[in-house]
Structure formats: C-alpha cells, structure tokens
Image: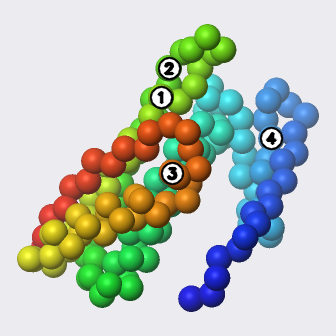
Amino acid sequence: MSEIPLNYRTTYEWTGLDMNGEVRIGDLPRLPTGTPLSLDRYCPEHILVVAAEACLANYVLLIASRTKLAVKSYKSSAEGELEKDGRGFRFKRITIRPTLVVEPGKEAAGERIITRAHELCMVARAMNIPVEIEPTITAA
C-alpha cells in the first residue's frame, strides 16, 4: 500500500441560489451542499458525521486485512448530537455504532480491531468533541 496523501484539496463554489453550493474533489462527481434544512443536498454537519463514520470503517477494514481477520460483514450508523452554547450550536458528541460480523471464535479480535481503529482514526483525533463507539460484534 502506498503512503497516504499529506494534503487534501477541495474547492467550493456557490451556485447563486439560496445557500446551495458544490464541492469538488479532483475529478470526482460534484457534491451538492446546502444547509441542514436542504432536502436535496448534503449539509456540512452530515458530512462531518459521515467523515468520522467512514474513517472508522476504513481503519477497521485495513487492520482486519493486515491481521488476516476475515470480516464477513461491516456496517454502521452514526449520529451527531448538537447542543446550544453561548455562541450558538455546536456538536456535543458523535456516536458511531459499527456492526462487525466475523468468523466464530474471533469476536474478541473484532473488538480489539474496532478499539484500535478508533484510536487511529485521523478524523476523530482531529475533533475537539467526543467520538464514541458502540460496537456490536457477532459471528457467522
């Protein structure tokens, strides 16, 4: 595996309508952005939560691959909780609920991998809010 990039570049352009914009990352399809009230666009708050969720998943799958743990299934859900402070709203916490299915007898290894993935996730480590993990590990 090659080294990861040390810089990440994005561009944002306002569409000229309401608070709608588009984010570009290289040649990938445009990501339509809006506000938390937008029904047809991604809001920055959702993008922040999914960044933490996807980061955890990537590390779980990377560590599992490197340790030869056979992952039968991985899925998760995540929730970002807001609170109001003296300056407005801010994130209080993000909770990620991963569900990992491994081969019988490997549940403890799955638990260790999720814990280690959480410790390594660059996105969660960059946040100044708690990112909590509530894993479910089963065997099949």
Which one is in front in this view, the residue at disc 3 or the one at disc 4?
3
Residue on which the image places disc 4: 21
Which one is in front in this view, the residue at disc 2 or the one at disc 4?
2
Residue on which the image places disc 1: 92
Residue at the image position 34 percent from the left and 78 percent from the top: 64
- Graded by Cα atoms within 10 Å as few (under 14), some (14 to 19) or many (20 or more), the crowding at tag 2 reads few
Three-letter amino acid code of the residue under disc 2: Glu
Is the C terminus in the top left, top right, bottom left or bottom right quadrant? bottom left
Q: Position of residue 103 (x, y in %)?
A: 15, 78
Would you say 106 lies left or right of 16 here?
Answer: left
CA–CA distance between discs 1 and 2?
6 Å
Residue 74: in sight, yes or no? Answer: no
Kindly indicate the quadrant of the structure image that contains residue 70. Answer: bottom left
Residue 6: in sight, yes or no? Answer: yes
As drawn, the label of residue 83 is 2
- Graded by Cα atoms within 10 Å as few (under 14), some (14 to 19) or many (20 or more), the crowding at tag 3 reads many
Upstream in the sequence, badge 1 or badge 3? 1
Would you say 37 lies left or right of 119 here?
Answer: right
Contact? badges 1 and 2 (CB < 8 Å): yes
Q: Is residue 62 above or below residue 79?
A: below
Residue at the image position 44 percent from the left and 69 percent from the top: 59
Q: Is residue 81 above or below residue 57?
A: above
Kindly indicate the quadrant of the structure image that contains residue 10. Answer: bottom right
CA–CA distance between discs 1 and 4?
26 Å
Three-letter amino acid code of the residue under disc 4: Gly
CA–CA distance between discs 2 and 4?
26 Å
- Provide the secondary structure element on which disc 1 rests: strand
Three-letter amino acid code of the residue under disc 1: Lys
CA–CA distance between discs 3 and 2?
19 Å
Upstream in the sequence, badge 1 or badge 2? 2
Residue at the image position 53 percent from the left and 52 percent from the top: 125
Residue on which the image places disc 3: 124
